[in-house]
Amino acid sequence: MGTHLGAFDYDEAFSRNLGWVTEDEQKVLQAKRVAIAGVGGVGGIHLLTLTRLGIAHFNISDLDIFEQGNFNRQAGAYMQNVGRPKVEVMAEMARGINPAMDITMFPEGINHDNIDAFLDGVDLYIDGLDFFVLDIRRAVFAACAEKGIPAITAAPLGMGTALLCFMPGKMTFEEYFRMEGHEEDERQLRFLLGLSPSMLQMGYLVDEKRIDLEAQKGPSTPMACELCAGIAATNSLKALLNRGDVVAAPWGLHFDAYKNKLKKTWRPGGNDNPIQKIALKIARKQLMKKRAQQTTEGSENLGPEISRDMDPALLRILELARWAPSGDNTQVWEFEVLEHNRFVIHGSDTRDWCVYDLDGHASQIALGTLLETIDVAASAEGMTAEFNLRPDSDERLPVIDVTLQKNAQILPSQWLPYVKVRTTQRRPFSSRNLTPSQKNQLEQAVGEQYQLVWIEGGKARWAMAKLLFRSARIRLTIKEAYDVHTRVIEWNSRYSEDRIPDQAVGLGTVPLKLMRWSLQSWSRVEFLNKFMAGTWLPRLQLDLMTGWFCGAHFMLMAKTPLSTLEDRLDGGRALQRLWLEATRLGLQFQPEMTPLIFTQYSRGKKQFSSRDEAMGEAAEIAADLEQQVAPDVATRGVFMGRLGWGQAPVARSIRKPLRRLLKSS
């Protein structure tokens, strides 16, 4: 039974290490001295991990203090430590584990004048310096090589770690990274590519704008820092006890927990390796592109009319509200700010060019989603939003006055965290059925004036998948839809501010390339459709497969026919509540509007295409949809889509910056 109170007992404190190390090896570890430069991020976790391993002598350095920006990853980052020196806090935490330990602190950090003192009597060096601190890092590693001190660096990359060990008598840091004679930008590239030749982390970076090269800041995760400490401490043990294989440069390890991958890298010659030279050449081009992009974005700031004149609460509301969904990301609205709590929405529609919006109804429903999003955003400020449609508004250009009012009873909406996360996933989902509880919550979200008709179960989903497959033939064989598709897709894009990025369309690599080639001219589309069964591949992948692989299809229906603009605005609000609730429940979501739109055109006798057969095909779709859903789906149907479990999309439409949506008073 362990000791609960009383004097510190080293043997008892670290007894659970025994078995993986011998008693004699534990005593050896106790006698070793380790130097750690930088104890804020991963360095602080290195210190605590090695302290728990039983090492009792440390030299630690850091000239920084703790700030709230450190909280996501740094071991000593607590509110009570904000403003305190990192070396002081981390020494205190380490002594809380081993009160008898010997720690020499270098609160001024490491510089060329104190490197020798920092490495005096040291058995092992672990690099915890910030990524961008390269000059001192090179100097410390060079001193380690000269003094015969093993040196380890473990970099937190994404949600993984890359390890390099520089052992006495083997390849040195400089021999591997080859930084001598290069400018700072090139040194940073060489350090990154040398650490991570496989670059596993880049496949899931979701917001490249968070890498700020000018400010020398980048994203980091707590998981990566913890993984760094584990792999570095393991190799420290092997190096200090002279047992086991230390993976020494030019060999390295890169483990990525997000991708479930472990790569053992080998770059003889380091960055002079031919493979590395090719990688560096590619990276240089990407860096130049990144810098040019950041320069452009920096020049396109919000502008003085936003940053200085607008009420901060109103700015926050509009910044969030602009994430409302709209067909093909058209964002059919502008904002005119009148006062700190009053603004005007100037709506529009796309009937002049979009075959899916010939009566403006799709745009009006999108405007309704904007109203609901404004209401949700206002709740974060303790406000309610009142909307008044101007009676003299043209249906094509609706004008809505918005007044925000403080209300002490208003709590932040449960949907606030999901406004920007809500998106469209066009790839297959799991076919697992939704639970009764989930369906009930979704039905509650749409409100009493609406109902959800569920199309679920294998037989019903297959029937709907076949309907979608047939409906898709219309959109792929009419010139009017071709004109829309050529306009709304942004090619070679993962994100798009005002269109759909091609990587979010849902097609595989080869079909996507074929689609891009065919959309360069209508004659190509006609040729493929006539001689090469051109509609089959996209319909199979985008409609039949996705129609089958989902938890359920649904039809959002109003309990009374949608006959006015106000009806459709309210229907859009119900849609946004449904979509946000689905997102809150962790469900993926995809609109399936073309069957409903073609049904409404058919029943309304609206001629939507110059291809004569299209109207007859739409009538067949209408009859099938009415049979599967409801006879009056054309008049009461608000929105149609599918739901289910699945991975979030890696590509998506984003939104125009607010400055592009503001209309001068």
Image (cartoon, rainbow, N blue to C red):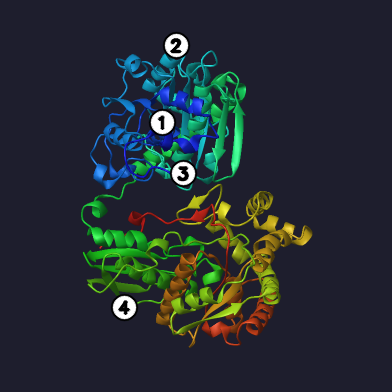
Q: Which residue is mark 4?
A: 390
Q: Which residue is mark 1?
A: 131
Which element carries disc 1, helix, strand or loop? Answer: loop
Q: Nearer the viewer, residue 345 or 320?
A: 320
Q: Amino acid at mark 1?
A: Phe
Depicted 291 relative to depicted 382: above or below: above
Task: Give the tally of numbered discs.
Answer: 4
**Chain-order first, disc 2 or disc 4:** 2
**Pointers 4 and 3 in contact (CB under 8 A)?**
no
Q: At 63% across and 83% down in the image, what residue appears?
A: 626
Could you tell me how far apart the alpha carbons at marks 2 and 4 are, in whole angstroms? 79 Å
Could you tell me how far apart the alpha carbons at marks 2 and 1 are, in whole angstroms? 23 Å
Q: Which residue is mark 2?
A: 146
On the question of residue 597 being in view, the answer is no
**Chain-order first, disc 4 or disc 3:** 3
Q: Nearer the viewer, mark 4 or mark 3?
A: 3
Q: Nearer the viewer, residue 3 or 94?
A: 3
Q: Nearer the viewer, mark 1 or mark 3?
A: 3
Quadrant into which the C terminus falls: bottom left
| Residue 546, horizontal then vertical, whole percent | 65, 64
Depicted 178 relative to depicted 409: above or below: above
Q: Nearer the viewer, residue 528 or 116?
A: 116
Crowd class of label 2 (few under 14; some 14 to 19; many from 20; radius 10 Å): few
Depicted 608 relative to depicted 451: above or below: above
Displayed quadrant of residue 406? bottom left
Crowd class of label 3 (few under 14; some 14 to 19; many from 20; radius 10 Å): some
Could you tell me how far apart the alpha carbons at marks 3 and 2 are, in whole angstroms? 34 Å
